[in-house]
Amino acid sequence: MQEATLAAVPRAMPMRWDLFCRVIDNFGDIGVCWRLAADLGARGQSVRLWIDDARALAWMAPDGARGVQVLPWIEGVEWPEPGEVVVEAFGCDLPPAFIARMSGGRPPPLWINIEYLSAESYVRRSHGLPSPQLSGAGRGLTKWFYYPGFEDGTGGLICETQLMAERESFDARAWLQSMLATLGQTVQADERVVSLFCYPDAPVPRLLESLGQQPTLLLLTPGAAAQAVHQAAFCPPAVRCVELPWLRQNEFDRLLWACELNFVRGEDSFVRAQWAGAPFVWQIYAQSDDAHATKLDSFLQLFLAGADAPLATDLRALWRAWNGLGDWPARLPAQAPWTAAALRWRSGLLRQRDLATQLLGFVHERR
């Protein structure tokens, strides 16, 4: 099976990486950067993760990761000699003093800007393009643009070498009962299990109405999801809500594996829902110029290619409604064809090389 091939990727030559992350809002930036740093560390690389706000790592990754050192990105720090690779996550703008040290390297480090994930057509056109620096502290250096993506010709998605093997051996019911027991809860035999991770503007009251059409255990992540349910004027009797604590990244993955339907947001949980192989709905980060609508439709075009017309119609309507781009549908899509579509999509993703494997190859080609 394709899942087994990921673990067979050979270990690359060890290098030192400097990965810069600026936390803008929520936890997407730090979530993606930590997963990438930990994945590189697990493959024998040495990573210094420079971050301006590392507080979320206290619950996201309290035990750290092999090969990863977390360092504060603060003004006036004495920057060390850069490693062989410098990664600028999401155009966060490296400190000029660090760029100056990069310029003094012989040879200088490879400078890579990892962009936000998108299914839009420009991703394949732009992936791997160089950007020569003509002025400033980095004059004479080249920055390379690296675009994660869902298709061949893009940089792929973060998928740890052991992830699919762990997913296949996972006992969803046992994990769920154990996790709920710590909260004094249990799952009933007739309940559908759904997770909710959303932004504050999600139409949660409409979702509750739809979920109320059958017995449902709704697992609420901390923050916006739990607050939205508390603020809802009505929750159907068939919906039983349980608030979850903050979960480590690997435990959040298992939450997605254990649920029959996952509502996710942003970038990190969006990708992890796809690896879960269960039905999911994505709330994209809204942009003032409505650029998020194009991004959403671009993904749906890929995801729904080859799907049965009725399912494609139902899923497109639900996703757009969840993102405030259309009317709420009368009912949720049928579970069985939705699950089949999620598994088919995951199988297609597993046919491309994962992000860390491609990134290591990208670095070695250019060094």
Image: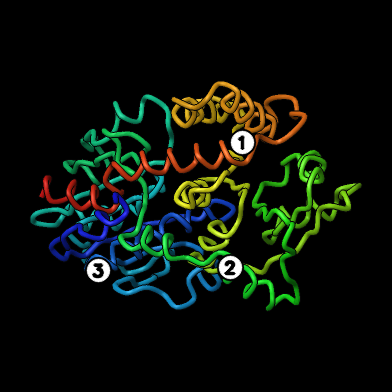
Q: Which residue is mark 2?
A: 247
Q: Nearer the viewer, residue 360 or 243?
A: 243
Q: Residues within 10 Å of mark 2 (few under 14, many from 20)?
A: some
* Of labels 2 and 3, the one closer to you: 2
Q: Quick check: 71 above or below 200?
A: below
Mark pair 1, 2: CA separation: 25 Å
**Is disc 2 in contact with disc 3, using a CB cutoff of under 8 Å?**
no
Q: Which residue is mark 1?
A: 286
Residue at point 42% right, 68% down? 72
Mark pair 2, 3: CA separation: 26 Å
Residue 269: % across, % down: 52, 51
Q: Amino acid at mark 2?
A: Leu
Badge 2 element: loop
Q: Amino acid at mark 1?
A: Ala
* Of labels 1 and 2, the one closer to you: 2
* Residue 134 in sight from this viewpoint: no
Q: Quick check: 121 above or below 11?
A: above
Q: Residues within 10 Å of mark 1 (few under 14, many from 20)?
A: some
Q: Which residue is mark 3?
A: 46
Q: Nearer the viewer, residue 298 or 97?
A: 298
Residue 307: % across, % down: 49, 27
* Residue 155 in sight from this viewpoint: yes
Q: Residues within 10 Å of mark 3 (few under 14, many from 20)?
A: many
Q: Which image quarter: residue 73?
A: bottom left
Badge 3 element: strand
Q: Which image quarter: residue 288?
A: top right
